[in-house]
Each structure stands twice: as C-alpha cells, then as structure tokens.
Image (cartoon, rainbow, N blue to C red):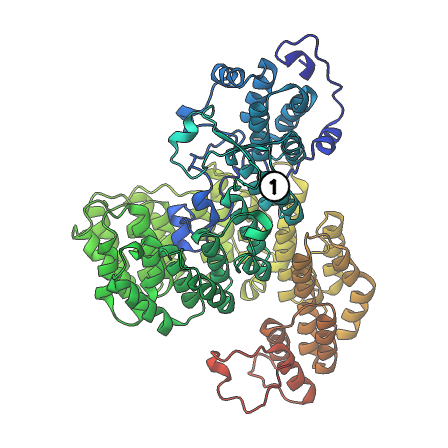
Amino acid sequence: MSIVSTLLGLCSLSINVASTASFTHSLGIQLRVTPRAPLSVFYRRSGSFDQAIGKDGGNEVQQQQQPRRKKHKTGSSYKYGTNKSQRLDLKSLRLRVIDYGGTTAVANALFKLQNAKIEREVIEAGAEIEALRVDKTETREVQGLVVRAAALSGLMRLAISTLYSLLDAGYVPGPVAYIPVFLSLRKMQRIATMEEVLGRIATACLTEGFVVDTRDDRKPNAQYADESSVRTEIVGAGGSTKMSIVAVNTYIASLCDIRNFDSAINLLRPGGMSDRFGVDPDICSYNTILTAAAKARNNYVVNKVMDLLKERDNIEIDIVTINSQLRVRVLSQNHEEAIILIDEILEGKNEALKPDKYTVDLALVPLAREGRLEKVVELIDGLGKLDAKTLSAFLTRLVDSCEIEAAEMIFNKFLNGDFPYCQPMARHFNIMIDGFSTIENRGTDAASLLRRMVRQGISPDAYTLTSFIKNSSTVTELKHIWVQAQERYGVKPTFINYVAYITSLGRLLDPSQACIVFDEMEEKKIYRSVVAWNALLGTISQPENSLQTLETGSDGVLASEVNGLSGSDASKKILQMMKGNLMYPNPNSQTFCLVATALANNGAPIEEALDLFYLARDSGFGGEGRFINAIIRCYGSDINAAMKSWRFELGREVQNHNVGNADAKSKNMKAAYLGLIYVCGKAGRADIALRIVYVMVKESIEPDENTLNSFIAGKRKRNNGEAVRMDGLNEQLMEVECTKYNPRDKRRESDQRIRIII
C-alpha cells in the first residue's frame, strides 16, 4: 500500500513521493540521529560507576531540561508520557490534536512519527507532515507539537522551519516544544544553527506584542501530563518575557563538547548572557562548564568558573559544583587537594552540600590510599539506602584502582548485613573474585569466596567463570576450571566464556588447544562471529605462538585444516576459510591486521605480505594504519625497500583511506608510521627515524613514547633481544622529540638534560 493511500483515508490528498534521497534532502534529515536513540539525554559520564548505575548523575544541563522519561527500546523518542503506560495511543493523540484545533490528518502523521522504528518510517512520516503544510493550515499549538516531534526524530529542517513560522507569526511556543530542537542540535554539533535559533527566540521574547507560552519547563512531571494546559503572556511595551534558561544551558554544553571553554565562560561574565539572550545564568550554567572542564582535566577553567561564581551573591553552589571540583583533582592525580576538599565535605556545615553517590564514588580512592577506611564507611553510611548497582560501582572503582583491602572491608560489611536494603548478588561476588584473582597470592581468597558464594545460595554465572579463566596460570589449571564450572556448578559456557578461554590459551602458549576449543563452539551450537575468529587469530599471531607448528590431533573442521601448519600459515588458512565459505562471517580490518601480524612475527617473505595487502585493499581495508604497520614490519631490516613501498603504494593507501574526522585520520597515519619507525630501529638507521618523526610533526601528528618505543623494539630485535640504550646524536634527538615533559613523571627525575619549553 502506498503512502498516499494510508494518509488517514484522505482521498483528496495527494503526495508526490520521490526517492528516499529526495525526502532526506527536502526535510533536512540528519540520519545520525536515529529514532532508536532518544535525544533527551546525550552526555554519558565515563567510568565504571556511571556505567554501572546507567545514569548521568545530574551533573549536566539535562538535569533541569526535561522530566525524566523512560527509555523505549523501539520507536521514536517522541514520547508524551513518563513511561510506556502513559504513551498516547492513536485515539488519544487525535483527541489531543483536535483539542488544539488540529486535524485528524496531522494526528495520524504524528502518531506514525511517534512509533517509527527505522529511518525509512521516520522519513515517510516526515513527508506526510511536510505535505500537510502545518505552518499554513494548523493552529500554533499543533505546530508546537510538530516542532517537538520533528526535533526528537531528527527531522531538523522541518522542526526549525515550523518554529520559524511560529516566530514570524508573533508566537513563541513553550520550552517543551523548542528545547528538543537544542538537544538535537547539540547532538549534531551544529553550534552556528543553535546560535541562530537562540537569537530568534530571544528577540521574540523581547518584542512588543508577541505571544509567549510561559509554561515553566522545570515544573514537576505532572505539568506535562496535560499538554493543553498552556499559559501565555503578551509582551508589553518596554517589557519582556524571558526564554528558557535550559535552552541557553544546552548551548553552553555544546560549546563545552567541542572544548570551546572561552566562549562558554564569556556567557558567565556580567552581562554576557543577559545582553545576548535576555536571561541570567543559574547554577546549572556554571555546573555545566565545571563538569566538562573537570572531565577534560582543565584546572584553569575550573578555577576561572569558580571565581566568576563567587562574584554572584544570588547563586549558591550545590553538590554538583563540589563534585566537579573534586573530579578534576582526582583525575589530575592531585590526591592531596582532593583530600582537603573531601574533609570540607565531611564537616557537613552546609546541609545543601550533603554528599551524594557521585561524591562518594570520587572520594573512595583518595581516602583508601590515605588509609582512612573509616571515612569511606562514613561516606557510604551517609547515603542511607544503598542499592545493588551503586554498591557494585563502588566495589568496581576500588578493585580497578588496586585498593582491594578497602573493597574487601566494604564487601564484608555488606555480607554482615550492614547494608540492609541491598541483597548479595552474583555480580558483587564476581567483582571481588576478579579483584582477588589479579593480585599475587590472593588466588586462594578467590576460591574461598566462590565457596562462600555457593553456600549463600548464589549460583556462579558466566562472569564468574570468566574471572577464573582469564587469571589461570597454567593450561592444566585452565582446563580444570572449565570442567569444574560445568560439572560441579552447572555453569553453561557462553560466547564470552569461549572467547576468554581461547584468549587465555593464547596467553598460556597453547594455540593448538585453542583451535580445538574453537571447533567445540560449533558443536555446542554457539555462533562464531567475527569476534571469535579474531580471538583465535589473536592467539595464533602472538610472537611465541606464530613460530609453533600446530598439532591439534583433532578431526574438527578447523583443527584438521590447520594441523601441521605454522602459525603464519595457519592464519592464512583461517582467512581463506572465512573468505571462501558463506556460512562463516566476513573478515574485518582486525582480521587482516592479525594475519599480517602473524606473518611479521614469523618472518614471512615480503611477497606474502604484499599479497595479503592486495587482498585487504580489494576488501576495503588496505589503508588501515595497524594493518599497514604489520605489513611494513615484514620488511625486517630492509628500510630502503620499506621506504620505497611506502612512497609508491602503502603510504598512498593510508593517505586515501577514509576513517572519518581529522583526529581519526591522524591516529590512523600514526599507526602506520610506527611500522616504519620499527624497521628503522631494526636497521639501525636512527637518522631516517628522526626524519620520519619530523615529517609526523609537520603533518600535525604528535610523536610520543609509543613512537620511541617502536624504535627501541626494532633496535632490541636487531640486538637479539638484549637491552639497548639510546646512544648517538640522532637517537638522543629523537628521544627528546618523543618525550613529553611532565613534572609528575617519576621516571624523568634523574634526567640531566635541560628542556627548553617554547
């Protein structure tokens, strides 16, 4: 059925449906914003704590922008309710639009847009709305709904054109309509468009005679349950109605996203925001910049914003402000200053600055390293009701920071019932088991914890098995763990377990057994994606393993194919199997890179490496920097041949390879250059290596210690693995070029050289 025949049964309506490309062009669709990705929250904080709790902590501008909406797995992010039960069905949406004075046609189109699951459906729904010419035929309230729906679905040209039509008609819709526009523009990093829209709305709010929807977008969720409760004001002579501060804060967040802190700070200066947009900054304006600067470890910006905040007598700091200051000190490894700030928080003189879970997360490691475990307990107790996800995040933070004693103390208090609202789960035991397994002489504690886990009636799961697998020390131990997990504890190995098993066999230098386990996956009906194939290739391509002759002694499909082959030949055979069988996944860039690594480690002839290069180029992966790195290393110490191949073939392929933005292209080029640096080291040609470093600098590719280490690795290979020193003028110059000055780098304390910093 065509789109025309489905448009609400309106026989009189006709649409000339062109191609999808023409729809995209006419509607201004930004396909990077898909209907499956809600735009109400964009900025995810990094770190185990934030990933574990699945929230952004309120430290961003979104804290005050919109009522929290439940995420939906499918459909557009255009949702009217706070959860699925509150979403409007077609009948309710029709009634809403009709109450606004709209037509059934636009209600049906909005319903389709609300429930679109793929980009094509978004495009078709947008085309219907475009054909209805809502700016000419619908009421201003209905147009506000269209602005919101289009923005949340990525139809930015439709959203902005409809918004401008309202402004041209002397009407400013409520923030609930235009804030999604700024959220979407931020996602797309369209700063100039955001400035233009902000200017239009700000001017309208200051223009006499304009009608402005004054509904406060920071009211409780109940206000949004009924979209028809619209309050308006008419701008009088000499008067004004302020636009939403949330829109300006979203603009500030966009500036921070691209690290344009100077422009963001200028808005906080006296008159900076009010002169441009007619509103004054609030605490969230400051916190938005503070949070971004803290993540960027920019102490200067943090201090500058705090100085401006102190000048504002009418704005009081909150815990988000404190968390930003604490974050920048922790990320900068300035634990002394972090402890001072933590002590001020613990004094608790200001009730408004009561620590939240983000404060505790940031304070855990500094306090643990100071040996002040009682303060750690005090902070956690102060949170009151502690949920399982937050506790998991705290334990993960401490374990990842090697503060296992502090983690163990918290975990024991937890098991003793000190956190009554939180029940022990497998995830808590898994975190501690993983922590014990990675520390020398604590393996028995991990085993004891496993037994305690079983005694408490908590069954080990696949993650428990992975923790023991990746920390096993011998192949015999690894096999024993694998069998015991299944026979004694009833664990059913998953895809992740098999990949960990194969990877560990590579670490323990048994690639033959890895091939047998790989065949076992097929016997157990576990789909072997390209990740599994690459895990096997990673095992075979390791330096020690690539020199082995595989002795599988198995009649499995893959094991029998590679039996008796060397690591490099086995890698080529596996690649051939992937390319020649439709039942197997297609190789990706990492696949080719691993095969090339196996060839390089096994000292394969350069002719074989170039054949692999041509095959990868035909598959679209010839310009991958890591792959070219491995190909170049196959030249051994023949730096002249490597340079010739770089000039006429390999280098051009990397240059022409499309990897996205400038930063990604720079990283790709750098990875390839490191291969040349390695060959220089192996050839003992520091003079050529130094010239390559200068070329990298000229191309805005900053050499670092990885560059230096590549040369040292090649030189060590030249000396049969013996330790090497950077002697000679060229080598010393290259060391200076590749070594950044860092006053906290303890390795440089004994340097006798004088560095001139320009």
| 497 w.r.t. 224: above or below | below
Give left or right: position of 411 versus 8: left
Q: Quadrant of residue 355?
A: bottom left
Q: Is residue 91 left or right of residue 415?
A: right
Q: Residue at x 67, y 89 (%)?
A: 728
Name which residue type carries label 1: Pro
**Is 407 drawn above or below residue 458 in the view shown?**
below
As rendered, which of 484 and 119 lies closer to the eye? 119
688 displayed left or right of 712? right
Mark 1 highlights which residue?
585
Residue 306 shows in the view = yes
Q: Residue at x 54, y 66 (%)?
A: 544
Outermost right residue: 648
Residue 319, how many percent across, how many down? 35, 56
The quadrant holding residue 628 is bottom right
- Mark 1 secondary-structure assignment: loop
Query: Where is residue 280 drawn, in percent x and y?
Result: 50, 51
Q: Which residue lies furthest to the front in this view?
A: 237
Taking depth in this image into account, of 488 and 461 the one nearest to the observer is: 461
Disc 1 crowd, CA 10 A, few/some/many (<14, 14-19, 20+): some
Q: Which of 54 and 212 is in front in this view?
A: 212
Q: What's the residue at 62%, 20% (across, down)?
A: 138
Check the image and report above or below for 322 versus 52: below
Residue 46 shows in this picture: no
Q: In which quarter of the image is the C terminus?
A: bottom right
Where residue 111 sits, quadrant-wise, is top right
